[in-house]
Amino acid sequence: MEEEWAVAQLPPAAAKPAPVELVLAWVVRGQIAVVFAIVAMDLIGWATGRQALTRVYPTWPQMTPWTAVLLAVSAAALLAQSGRASSTAARAGRVLAATVAALSIVFLAEYATGSSFGLDEALFAEAVRQLQSSWPGRPSPQTASSFLMLSAAIMVQRIDRRWSRTVWPAGLLLAAVIPLVVLLSYTTESLDLVRVAPSTGMGMSTALGLLTLVAAAVLARPDRRPLARLLNRSDRRMLLQMVAVLAAMPPLTVGAHLTFQSLGVSHESAWLLAIAGSTVTVGAAAVYIVAHASRLLAASEERYRLLTDNVGDVITHIRDGKFAWLSPSVADTMGAPPEYWLGREVAEMVPTDDHPVMIANLKKVDDGGTLLERVRLRSADGQVHWAHLHAKPYFDSAGRRDGHTATFRLIDDEVAIEREVEGARRQQALAEERYRRSVDNAAIGMCLVTPDGRFYQVNDALCQFFGYDAETLMTKTWQELTAPAYLEADLDKVAAILEGRLDSYRMVKQYIHADGHPIWGDLSVSCLRDENGSVLNFISQITDVTAQEEAEKRSRALTQRLRRQSLQTMAELKSAATYLSSIMPRGLSGRVEVSSRYLPSSELGGDCFDYVWVDEDHLLVYLIDVSGHGLEPALLSVSVHNLLRSGSLGLETLLEPGATLGALNRMFQMDRQHGHYFTIWYGVYRASERTLRYSGAGAPPALTFGAAPGGATTVTRLSSTCPPIGLFPDTEFADASYSVPAGCRILVFSDGAFEIDLADDRQLSLDGFEALCAKRAGSPDWSLDDLIAELKSLTPVKDFDDDCSLIQLTFD
């Protein structure tokens, strides 16, 4: 098979070189610059005749002009192929290196044949004849041999073939041997190793130039051995330091030898002391470097231990399907320490159902692949967890395959959240489907409207509302379907949404049906906006409220009619209340002074009272309270009042309280009065005997107030236990008698006087009313107005809830 030449290609220009490559590239350029400086100094020396520039020491050989040329061309060849060289530059570099090889072969052939091919004095002929007696201008055989080896290595500097990987290091090694020997000979004063004649050999500057180019060639290819091997080692820093220390030993030894000789020490003793001193110095430096590296290694191991102890992820080394090492975090993650898992099969950490997947994953990694996926793992207590797994082949420090590594992290919470999100997505999809169906089947009209008012999506309910089919309706705009009286208000709302002042609005408006009659709709409008806030479309919902609007129209008319009737009724009730108040007495004076008050509530009630002298000796007093409110109780109370005033029952009956109440009970049974009954307190005072005969039917007791010894006030209740009038037809009403002392006061009242709500949400009791009246009765000039004012002050509304009737009798 024909072998092809291939030029190693650097990464494309877009690729960014590694920092180490950048540093090495600058070092290579600096070394080549040093070589060019040596060449320039040598050529200047030959041109000017200054021997100091062509040789380092007067007795050492010079660098011949042709040697300087070979150095310069070799440096140019290496420079052309260094860094990010193009293919053209690389080929030019190989041509220059081949030129150096050809010249080296010519010079070696001249030495082998003992003749000259005419190149010796081609450069600085006169100067070289004066400074070099034998073979003037020609490089020495040692030098030509080194250039030949170096040129071979430079020619394959950018060629990546199997044979080139052998030629390149061999050429560089052979090119460096003679210069190293020369350098050692000069420093140890063993010049016979490098001379072939008294005036020719390899000069110090030539050796330094060659060694510099060899070093530059090595550094220009960091991807090749030995530099690649060194850079890939984790201890490369220490190795470089050791190399530097060992490289410093020869110059250190020579420097010490010269120093001892200057102090008068003999030659042999100076060498012995120099070697011993440099050995101790280099050994001490080597010990320090190793110790320092050991401390760094210990610190690194400690950091690694802390990292593995504290890292949340679990790191494992798996060999032959078993755990060979696990990080301490496995204890918290999988419920057991590393010692529990060491030596166990990986399958023990995997649920049985997932074993086929595990086997496939292990095979993938064993084949050199990388695994990055979500798996299920089983902890020591049997719990199954979800984990992120990253597995890949594991290589030891020597680059040998040693199982694989697997790193995992539990993600139970993440999986739970993802499942919740997935569930939410499904619910959202169901909700969207339900929404679509609900829109299509909604009982109210729904539509999407463009900003200019055109319908572009409508449902069946909206089509039925307007009386158009969907296709026809989507050719319309809402403006042309709106009644003119409502168009301006709707346009103002739409403008506010378009300008961003509103996001939604609602209004009841009138539309025009397809057949021309007006229809009413309850319109709700919102909008969808883009990221810039502009309206994409309007979302409108229209509820058909035509029937409600018509009903409300009828209701408003009925309400107005009812209001008029209510006002008329209220006026009539007010007139009735005025009439009731007008038929009640205003007061009496004489032997018995009587004062009374009638305070009707907001509704017409059934209170009515009277007090009148039926003859010279008898004063009749009664207070009626019909159940309920309104016209019927008022009429019933007036009927009873008129019956008693008319005397239709006869004077004999009227003077007997029990007989009077019995007659009223028989006449006004509640089943004949639309379910109304009434209470009554009825009394007859006989002035000649100063006695009061009384009876009651469900009414509050009358209160008597008299003076007691010591200025106290006595209170007596004139009560009865009989039921109200109209409840039971066979009720017997008994009389009671009370002797009226001089100066006595009697208060007759309806239940509206004490059944009042107090400010603390309680209700005034009869006992409380009695105590309040007793307190007032202690004052000789108390009046009903004072009592009424105090009762009102106890209520939150400062008024009575029910009709309030009060009669006060003062006896002489």
Image (cartoon, rainbow, N blue to C red):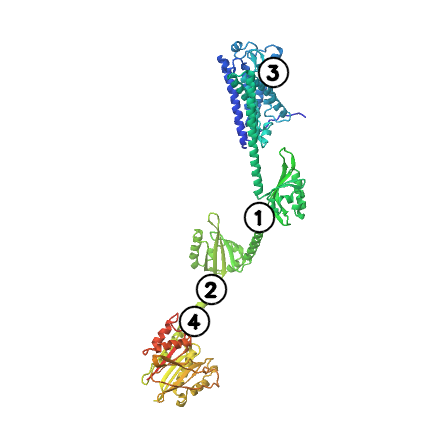
| Callout 2: SS | helix
Label of residue 762 in the image: 4
Instruction: Return the residue at label 3.
Output: 105
User: In the image, is 765 to the left or to the right of 143?
Assistant: left
**Cα distance, mark 2 to mark 1?**
56 Å
| Callout 3: SS | helix
Mark 2 touches mark 1? (CB < 8 Å): no
| Callout 1: SS | helix
Instruction: Return the residue at label 2.
Output: 549
Q: Earlier along the polypeptide chain: callout 2 or callout 1?
A: 1
- Neighbor class of circle 2 (other Cα within 10 Å; few <14, some 14-19, many 20+) is some
Q: Which quadrant of the figure has residue 309?
A: top right
- Placement of 329 over or under 680, stated as above or below: above
Q: Amino acid at mark 2?
A: Glu
- Placement of 359 over or under 568, stated as above or below: above
Label of residue 414 in the image: 1
Q: Amino acid at mark 3?
A: Ile
Is 655 in front, or is 562?
655
